[in-house]
Image (cartoon, helix red, strand yellow):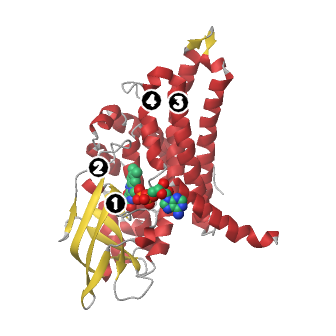
Amino acid sequence: MQITWTQEQRERREKFRRFGAEQVAPGAAERDRSGTFHSDSWKALADEGFWTAHVPVEHGGEGGSLWDFLAGLEGLALGADDSGFVLTAVAHAGLVHVLLEHGTTEQKARLLPPLMSGAVGATAATEPTGGSHVAAVHTRATVHDGGRWLLSGDKSHITNAPVADILLVVGRLDGIGKRDITLFVVDRGMTGVSTGEPEDLLGQRTSPTGPIHLRNVPVTEANIVGPAGDGLTTLYSFLAFDRLMYGIVVASQLEALLPATIARTSSRQAFGTAIGNHEYVQDKVVAMRTTVEASRHLAYAAADALIRRDSSYNALASCAKLAASEGGVTSALELVQIFGHSGYDRTQGVERRLRDAVAIRIAGGTTEMQKKNIYKDVVERFATQGS
Ligand SMILES: Cc1cc2nc3c(=O)[nH]c(=O)nc-3n(C[C@H](O)[C@H](O)[C@H](O)COP(=O)(O)OP(=O)(O)OC[C@H]3O[C@@H](n4cnc5c(N)ncnc54)[C@H](O)[C@@H]3O)c2cc1C
């Protein structure tokens, strides 16, 4: 398993850390208050080549490895100080990943160039009736005429929906029997596709999130990604990738907070000494560091399993997500505690970390869903060994 970046990957990580710090971070607190997506930075990110790293040369990419892309993502999350902007990148990366893994040559040739140059992607599974039980979606493509269907349904809480150009939609396909879950890729400009008002969320407020409405959208085989009727397998591989990215992103975001944390614990005095000399305070910093390392290395292990096509991929990705989301919330809560009243003050920039962190327990599959995945994997792997 690779856990040491090459020189080129280190340079890429540093390039996008600097991009995040210089281009994205300024104004992040203000955008959090107003709920504004930094669309200029989104275009600039594409112009800097963020999306080309692991896309094959024949589709306009650099032909690198998944690690090359992850190095850039890790750098961006380290520098950006704008969790919503990074969440938008994670959602977009999920669509790129599905196309790379499951798209046809025609779909890659048609969709990857715009997705690498500033178009925004979204992946829509959740519906107003629920998100955890993804196989229970109601969105459905009904037979229209030979080789054509009309896709209708509603999606909610979709990252990037208000600004997305290309949407991956989880639905059902009529006429193919019981296993009918299918993924459809549609353009925002297609007849019958519309989006609603951005949602007013607790955290991740700089990432535009909202509903998608589909009314008799005409789709053909060219809109189907992965095998028709086997969309759950395709969706699970997307979700696992999403989850491993959360491990990388949360680790970097927490790591970026450590210098300010140590500056505070070293300078703030209580009982005649720096608060960092009190062991209960040290304990909180230790927990932050442990979350950084656990999330990151579980994510690396999941990426390695993905590259090797190892069956541990799904469970490792859930482990990474669980460590990142639960550790992220605990760390952010304790960060508020370390900063005391300043941590609780909305003008000081600490409490936003907690609001952002809570979202990661829900987006990409809740904490409970990760536990279900991990438990199922343990049973499948180890049940027979004990008997
Ligand atoms: C910031 C953000 C961004 C998001 N972006 C996207 C996106 O891009 N695309 C998308 O499709 N969705 C997105 N979502 C939606 C997200 O995937 C869903 O909110 C999530 O899957 C949970 O669905 P739900 O909210 O309907 O909760 P429900 O499914 O109604 O579940 C409610 C509660 O019950 C628990 N629960 C349900 N079933 C079980 C069970 N069997 N055992 C134990 N507990 C259970 C859940 O864990 C949860 O705590 C986003 C959400 C957020 C917060």
Q: Are marks 1 and 4 in contact (CB under 8 Å)?
A: no
Tell which circle, 1 or 3, labels the residue nearer the N-terminal end.
1
Q: Are marks 1 and 3 in contact (CB under 8 Å)?
A: no
Above or below — where is 33 with respect to 37?
above
Structural crowding at the residue carrying mark 3, measured as other residues with C-alpha within 10 Å and reported as few (<14), some (14–19) or many (≥20) = many
> Which amino acid, mark 1?
Ala
Tell which circle, 1 or 4, labels the residue nearer the N-terminal end.
1
Tell which circle, 2 or 1, labels the residue nearer the N-terminal end.
1
User: What's the residue at 59%, 48% (across, down)?
Assistant: 323
Above or below — where is 348 with respect to 146?
above
Structural crowding at the residue carrying mark 1, measured as other residues with C-alpha within 10 Å and reported as few (<14), some (14–19) or many (≥20) = many
Q: Tag on residue 199?
A: 2
Write down the residue under mark 3: 335
| Distance in Å between CA atoms under marks 2 and 3 | 27 Å
> Element at badge 2?
loop
Q: Quadrant of ligand 1?
A: bottom left
| Distance in Å between CA atoms under marks 1 and 3 | 32 Å
Q: Residue 385, can we see it? A: yes
Q: Position of residue 225 (x, y in %)?
A: 38, 75
> Which amino acid, mark 3?
Leu
Does the closest atom of ligand 1 sit within 8 Å of the Cβ of label 1?
yes
Above or below — where is 151 with respect to 88?
below
Write down the residue under mark 4: 350
User: What's the residue at 44%, 72% (across, down)?
Assistant: 135
- Quadrant containing the N terminus is bottom right
